[in-house]
Structure formats: structure tokens, C-alpha cells
Image (spheres, helix red, strand yellow):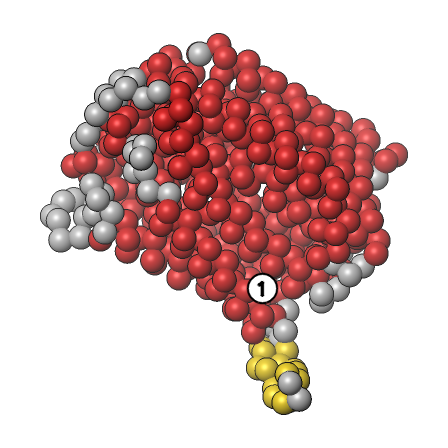
Amino acid sequence: MTDISLIRTNAPLTFGQQLRLTAKLSWPAMMAQLSSIMMQYIDAAMVGRLGADNSASVGLVSTSLWLFWGICSAVTTGFSVQVAHSIGASEPARARRILRQAITACLLFSVAVSAIGAAIAFPLPGWLGGDDAVRHDASVYFLVFVLALPLLTMNYLGSGMLRCAGNMKVPGGLNVMMCVLDVVFNFFLIFPGHDISLCGISFRLPGAGLGVLGAALGTVSAEVITAAAMMWYLCGRQPDMAIKGESGSFRPTRDVIGRAFRVSAPMTLEHAVICGAQIAVTVIVAPLGVMAIAANAFAVTAESLCYMPGYGIADAATTLVGQSYGAGRKDLARRFGYITVGAGMVVMTVMGIVLYIGATAVMELMSPVEGIVSLGAESLRIEAFAEPMFAASIVAYGVMVGVGDTVIPACMNFGSIWLVRLPLAAILAPTMGLPGVWLAMCIELTFRGAIFLWRLVSGAWLRKGL
């Protein structure tokens, strides 16, 4: 069986072995990403049963939450990439030193970000142009998540470190567990208690009836439990990474922080700018009405079913390319880049076809409101055509992150969304409504994929690594 240790031992790898290793690492990573998306589906479907206003309150702040989550996740990546290079270079002691410093640095950073989020939680829905009817629930939903950011960041750090060490199964399994916990917690926290009958036996099922607040508390509870399990395994059980019982300083040092900054700073800035653009899209959509806001939020969640497998393959690409680069095997890193990008494009093309065919059925799972279903399905069918090139941009970005090349790819990402998507959306929305916004997105994602493919083939990313 092909094992990732072959990379750092400089053993030769045939094309078939490279394909099998890519599949071996990609499959659990894809499952982890899909379980994360299932959580969003669960939240959307359960909140959708409460009505259009509740759905709109969640949809209004969802892009703002992605901004805060993404910033914290990007910060952890700077440390995870260093771990991949250290493992690839067969230096486990250095990997453990990076882990200890990462825990301290990421906790401090996430506490600061959490404080900023809490300070803007209540004025935020008004800034985004939300109706008075949805503002309070939107603020409460946002506040619960940002207060939990330090613990959620440990989930990002733990899963990222395990993946970069070559362990995809534990993060994948724990994310599936998180999905199951989310279903259970949400069921009892969102809806009020009610009577049910099974086989002629009636009994009362308890429920807190917290609505949108219950959705936030349920999801956060599931993520916090998963974060604890993730960090326990990483620090106590993972070979080459376990720091339990080992002496060593948790104080960040200049060299580790400097390298993390080189990787994470462009990613953090890029994510902030991209999410800023997504928030701007929300502002463009908001005047179209509550139906459009809810349909847009549900369609974004539905589309994620297509692109999250791409992010799973991108996680595998970061590990494979990062360890190859750390082992000094640049030709192998390039080959893994081509293989993973090709695999991502194939998988997401298939998913795009499935999305086009099943757009209405997917939307009906999340909302019983006919207007929301119709608008969302029309938008999804437009977006389905962009999935192959969207895959190219997602996985190629993961490849480049693997060597520590993030500055130029970050500029490509936010330049594409700000210079192509936003102007087109602003032009098309007044005449075409929500479908015009999604047409702009489709055009922009196709353009973004093309420029990432160009950079991948040029090989410039290999010369810009750490």
C-alpha cells in the first residue's frame, strides 16, 4: 500500500502510486468537508422551517461570519504549512515546537478577533441593510459564533495540523461526529417540545424552542466538542506531533512567527477582502427583498455541496505538495500539483451536473417557501457551469499554499472577485435580480480558474515557496 512516508524517505513514486496516494488522502478530506457542509444544510433546513424572516436573519450575517471564521482559519495555516515541511524533512522535534507556539499564537489572535466581532454584533445587520424584522435574530446568531471563536480556532488548528502530518482519517471521522451532534443539538434547541406517536404509543419530545438562537448554540456546541477531541488526539496521540508529557516552551519565537506571517498574512488579507466582497454582494442583494436574501443564502449553502469536495482535495494537495517540497523533491511537488488539480476538476464537474439536475430538489430540502425555492434553483443552475474552473482555482490554491506561496495567489483571488464579480453583479442585479448576481459569479469563477491554471503550469509558485 502506498504510504505518505515514501515522500520523506526519497523513495521513487510511480504515477500510479502518486494517484493512489492522492486518492488515499483526498477521500477522508473530502468526507470531512462534506460533513461540514451537511451541518450548514442541517442549519438551513431546520431554520428554513421557521419561516422566511428567520432564514433571512441567518443569511444576512452568514458572509460576515465566514469573514471571521476564515481569518482565524488562515492564521492557523501559516503554522500547519511549516509542520508539513518539517515532517517532510524528517524533523518531528521542530514540528512539535511549531505546534506549541501555534497554540499560543492562535488563541491570542482569535480572542482579539472575537472581541471585535462582539463589539459590532448588534449594529452589523443594520449596516448590511437588513429589515427591522430580521435584525435582532441576526445579531444574536452572529454574537454566539464570534464569542466561541477561540475554541473554534482550536478546531481549525487541530484539523490542519493533523492533515499536514498526513492524518486525514481522524479529522474526517471527528467532522462526521460533529455533523451528527449538530443534528441532535439543533433538533432539541431550535424547536419547542411537541407530542409524537410511534406504533400507537404517544409521548412528548422535549425542546427548548429557541429558534435562530438554538441553531447557533447547537452548531457551536457540536464544534466545541469536536475541537476538544481534535486537540486531544493531536497533542496526545498523533505520531511525531504529540506533545503530552514533553517539556517545551509555548512562547512564540521570531522565526516560527515570521514564517507563519509570510504564509498567513496574505491569506488573511485575501480572505478579508474576498469576504468583504461577499458582504458587498449581500448589500447588493438586500434591496431585492427578504425572498432574495433567503434564496441567496440557501443557494450559497446548496452550491457548497459541489465545491467542498474540491476543498477536500485541496487539503490533500497542501499536504502532498508541502511534504514533497520539505523533502526537497520539487519535481514530485509539481506532479502532485497537476494530479490534484485534475482530480478536483473531474470531481467538481460531476458535482456540477448533479447540482444542475437536482437544483429544485435541493432547495426544497431547505425551504418550503415556493418563491425562495424558485429563485434559488434558477441561481444554482447558472452557477453549475462554473464548477470545473472553480475547482481549478480551489485546488491550485491549495497546491501553492503547500510550498508557502501565498502572496500572488491571494492577489489573484481578491483581484478577480473585486474587479470582475462585483462590478458585474452591480450592473446585472437591477435588471435581472438575483439570477444576475449569480451570472456575475459564474463569469468571475471561470476567469479565476483560468488564471490559476496559467500560474500552475508556469511553475512560478515553486520558486516563491518558503
Q: Nearer the viewer, residue 258 or 358?
A: 358
**Can residue 461 be seen here?**
yes
Mark 1, residues whose alpha carbon is within 10 Å: few (<14), some, or many (≥20)? many
Which residue is identified by label 1?
215
Residue ID at (52%, 28%): 343
Q: Position of residue 350 (x, y in %)?
A: 63, 35
Q: Position of residue 135 (x, y in %)?
A: 68, 59
Q: Position of residue 21 (x, y in %)?
A: 38, 31
- Quadrant of the image containing the C terminus: top left
In the image, residue 380 sits, relative to residue 10, either above or below, namely below
Residue ID at (66%, 24%): 446
Q: Position of residue 22 (x, y in %)?
A: 41, 31
Q: Quadrant of residue 444?
A: top right
**Can residue 265 be seen here?**
no
Q: Quadrant of residue 229?
A: bottom left
Q: Nearer the viewer, residue 429 or 113?
A: 429
Residue ID at (40%, 55%): 174
Residue ID at (50%, 12%): 457
What secondary structure is marked by label 1? helix
Q: Is residue 23 left or right of residue 215?
A: left
In the image, residue 369 sits, relative to residue 319, either above or below, namely below
- Quadrant of the image containing the N terminus: top left
Q: Is residue 154 left or right of residue 292?
A: left
**Amino acid type at image mark 1:** Ala
Q: Which residue is at the far right? A: 431
In the image, residue 183 sits, relative to residue 363, either above or below, namely below
